[in-house]
């Protein structure tokens, strides 16, 4: 599974990406309005990337990875989710999630 690449698209050397500041996947997805159901490693939710009628999206609470069984949307962490959901570039999504720190 592909993770959002901290260097790709981050061509602003004055900033540092802090992966450890990414929000907890469970809290993040809850805040995004996803109702996570089911047991085990993969939770199910209604997919926000297509007109979903049943929970087609699978989400991991440990890594934040997600994959939709219907439309194929997927990513390795909540950052990748945020980029895709809001059409953001890496830097803007990272900033929105509070993981960008200005270097001194
Ligand atoms: Zn989908």
Image (cartoon, grey):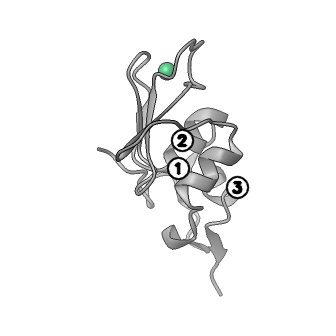
Q: CA distance from mark 1 to mark 3?
A: 11 Å
User: Which residue lies under the disc numbered 3?
Assistant: 96
Sequence-earlier tag: 3 or 2: 2
What residue is shown at x 38% (from left), y 21% (from top)? Answer: 69
Q: Are marks 1 and 3 in contact (CB under 8 Å)?
A: no
Q: CA distance from mark 3 to mark 2?
A: 12 Å
Image location of residue 47, percent across then percent down: 55, 25
Q: Secondary structure at mark 1?
A: helix
In the picture, residue 85 is in which quadrant? top right
Q: Secondary structure at mark 2?
A: helix
Frontmost residue, 42 versus 77: 42
User: Which residue lies under the disc numbered 2?
Assistant: 81
Sequence-earlier tag: 1 or 3: 1
Q: CA distance from mark 1 to mark 2?
A: 5 Å
Q: Secondary structure at mark 3?
A: helix
Image location of residue 44, percent across then percent down: 47, 32
């Amino acid at each position: 599974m592909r993770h959002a690449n901290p260097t790709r698209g981050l061509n602003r050397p004055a900033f540092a990406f802090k992966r450890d500041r990414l929000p907890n996947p469970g809290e993040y997805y809850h805040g995004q309005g996803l109702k996570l159901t089911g047991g085990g490693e993969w939770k199910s939710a209604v997919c926000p990337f297509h007109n979903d009628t049943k929970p087609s999206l699978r989400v991991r609470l440990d890594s934040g990875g997600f994959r939709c069984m219907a439309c194929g949307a997927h990513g390795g962490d909540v950052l990748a989710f945020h980029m895709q959901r809001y059409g953001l570039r890496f830097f803007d999504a990272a900033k929105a999630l509070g993981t960008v720190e200005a270097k001194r």
